[in-house]
């Protein structure tokens, strides 16, 4: 079955712009989480969505937001981009909340570069 | 907040050697996970551990959930060139409202053929 699909794979934006990233979870998975990966900070939790509701949020400013649709697809948005937002943004899905027998399955990520 | 200390940061080994890496935490976790990440890709789950003291194998990989629930290790036996990549540990506390994964900073493994 298809894995977690993230689009686009690469993105270059200018400071001050906004960006929307998309994630399609594995079919039947209802929980979607987002992580930011940078060389300095590593993998950091952004937020988790389940049943179209944000269930948990990491320590990121309000410029970072997201949503989940009824088909479990999720989007995250970053407004007023800063240079420090350059990162690999990873989406992970799981069958239900918490760790399934197979943990979370990650997508290949969206590489965002802010110039 | 919870922090994971993963060591070593990097390893350079010869093909055929065994490898060991570990993670320690300042607080307990209910679940430990080990992931591998190749360049340009997302992390791929290798082993999941759900019970303190649990020892689990996946081919040449063996991982253990520490008895204190504050640590875990991953061993790779008879390394091969395709083992190259970054290995991450992750801890999770399931229950309540918090299901996030807390990741270590990773161990970069290089295997010399």
Image: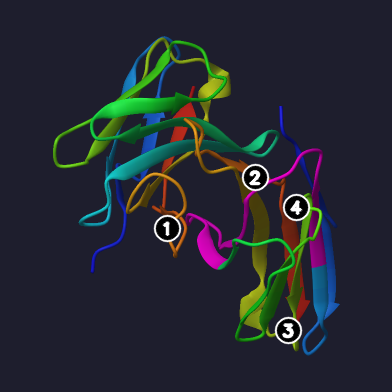
Mark 2 and mark 1 on one chain: no
Magenta highlight on residue B28: yes
Percent x, y for residue B110?
75, 70
CA gap, disc 2 to disc 3? 24 Å
Q: Nearer the viewer, mark 2 or mark 4?
A: 4
The numbered dot on residue B69 is: 4
Q: Chain of mark 4?
A: B
Magenta highlight on residue A88: no
Percent x, y for residue A72?
21, 41
Q: Which tag, 2 or 3, sits closer to the chain's start?
A: 3
Q: Nearer the viewer, residue B103 or A5?
A: B103
Left or right, A10 with respect to A22, comes to: right
Write the residue at 75% across / 52% down. Answer: B69
Residue bearing mark 1: A100
Q: Secondary structure at mark 2?
A: strand
Write the residue at 53% across / 33% down. Answer: A45
> Is the Cβ of the residue at disc 2 closer than 8 Å to that at disc 1?
no
Q: Which residues are magenta?
A: B21-46
CA gap, disc 4 to disc 3? 28 Å
Q: How many marks?
A: 4
Image height check: is B60 above or below B34? Answer: below
CA gap, disc 4 to disc 1? 19 Å
Image-quadrant location for residue A110 = top left
The numbered dot on residue B103 is: 2
Left or right, A113 with respect to B108, comes to: left
């Amino acid at each position: 079955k298809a894995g977690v699909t993230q689009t686009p794979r690469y993105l270059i934006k200018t400071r001050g712009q906004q960006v929307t990233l998309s994630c399609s979870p594995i079919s039947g998975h209802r929980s979607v989480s987002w992580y930011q990966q940078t060389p300095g900070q590593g993998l950091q939790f952004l937020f988790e969505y389940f049943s179209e509701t944000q269930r948990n949020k990491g320590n990121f400013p309000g410029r970072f937001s997201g949503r989940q649709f009824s088909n479990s697809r999720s989007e995250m948005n970053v407004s007023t981009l800063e240079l420090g937002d350059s990162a690999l943004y990873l989406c992970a899905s799981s069958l239900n909340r918490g760790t399934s027998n197979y943990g979370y399955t990650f997508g290949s990520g969206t590489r965002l570069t802010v110039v | 907040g919870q922090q994971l200390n993963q060591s070593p940061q990097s390893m350079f080994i010869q093909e055929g050697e065994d490898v060991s890496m570990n993670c320690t935490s300042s607080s307990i976790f209910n679940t430990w996970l080990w992931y591998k990440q190749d360049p340009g890709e997302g992390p791929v789950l290798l082993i999941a551990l759900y019970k303190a003291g649990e020892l689990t194998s996946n081919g040449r990989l063996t991982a253990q959930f520490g008895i204190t629930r504050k640590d875990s290790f991953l061993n790779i036996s008879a390394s091969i060139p395709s083992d190259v990549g970054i290995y991450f540990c992750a801890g999770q506390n399931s229950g309540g409202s918090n299901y996030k994964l807390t990741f270590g900073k990773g161990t970069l493994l290089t295997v010399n053929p």
